[in-house]
Image (cartoon, helix red, strand yellow):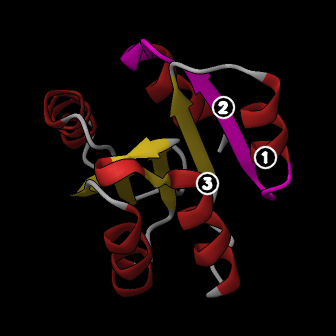
Amino acid sequence: MSAIKNILIAEDELLVAKVLKLFLEKKNYVVKHVSDERSAVIKAKEFMPDLIIMDVYLKDKTSGINASKQIRLNGSKSPIIFTTGNSIDQTTDAIKEILNSYLFIKPVDIDQLIRFIEEKL
C-alpha cells in the first residue's frame, strides 16, 4: 500500500462523493469531503491530506482548478487527481499547469482509481 493515508475529496455530486468515500474508507484511508472551491481550500489547509481528489467543476459553479491553484499557493505539494466529464483541451491544459496532478475522465472506475493511488502514488 502507498504512503497515502488522508484523502480529501472535493466533489459536488453527493452520491459520487459518498460512493468514493465508502470505497476508500474500506481500504483504510481517512477521507474528508467538501463540495465547493472555498471549502476545498480551507479543508486542505486544516486536514493536510496526502492526496486530493478534485472535481473540475464544483458546487455553485466554482472551480476545482482555481481551488487547486490556491491550495498550491498555500504550500501543499500533495498529488491532486482531477476528475471531470469534460476533456476539452482548455481544461486539460489548465490541469497540466498544476504540478503533481493527474486526470481521470468520468465516469471514474473506482477500482482503477484505487489501483492508481496504491501503485503510482
Q: Secondary structure at mark 1?
A: helix
Residue 95 in the image: x percent, y percent? Answer: 75, 45
Question: What is the span of residues highlighted in magenta in the rendered image?
Answer: 97-111
Residue type for callout 2: Leu
Asked if residue 118 lies left or right of residue 76, the reply is: left
Determine the residue positioned at 32% across, 59% down: 36
Q: Earlier in the sequence, mark 2 or mark 3?
A: 3
- Is residue 103 within the magenta segment? yes
Q: In this rendered view, identify the residue nearer to me: 23 or 58.
A: 58
Residue 23 in the image: x percent, y percent? Answer: 22, 29
**Label 2 crowd bin: few (<14), some (14–19), many (20+), radius 10 Å:** some
Q: In this rendered view, identify the residue nearer to me: 65 or 51.
A: 65
State how far apart marks 3 and 1 are (Cα). Answer: 7 Å
- Find out whether the residues at labels 3 and 1 contact each other: C-beta distance under 8 Å: yes
Compared to residue 57, the image places residue 114 above or below, namely above
Query: Can residue 83 be spotted in the picture?
Result: yes
Q: Which mark is residue 65?
A: 3
Determine the residue positioned at 48% across, 47% down: 54
**Label 1 crowd bin: few (<14), some (14–19), many (20+), radius 10 Å:** few
Residue 58 in the image: x percent, y percent? Answer: 38, 47
**Label 3 crowd bin: few (<14), some (14–19), many (20+), radius 10 Å:** many
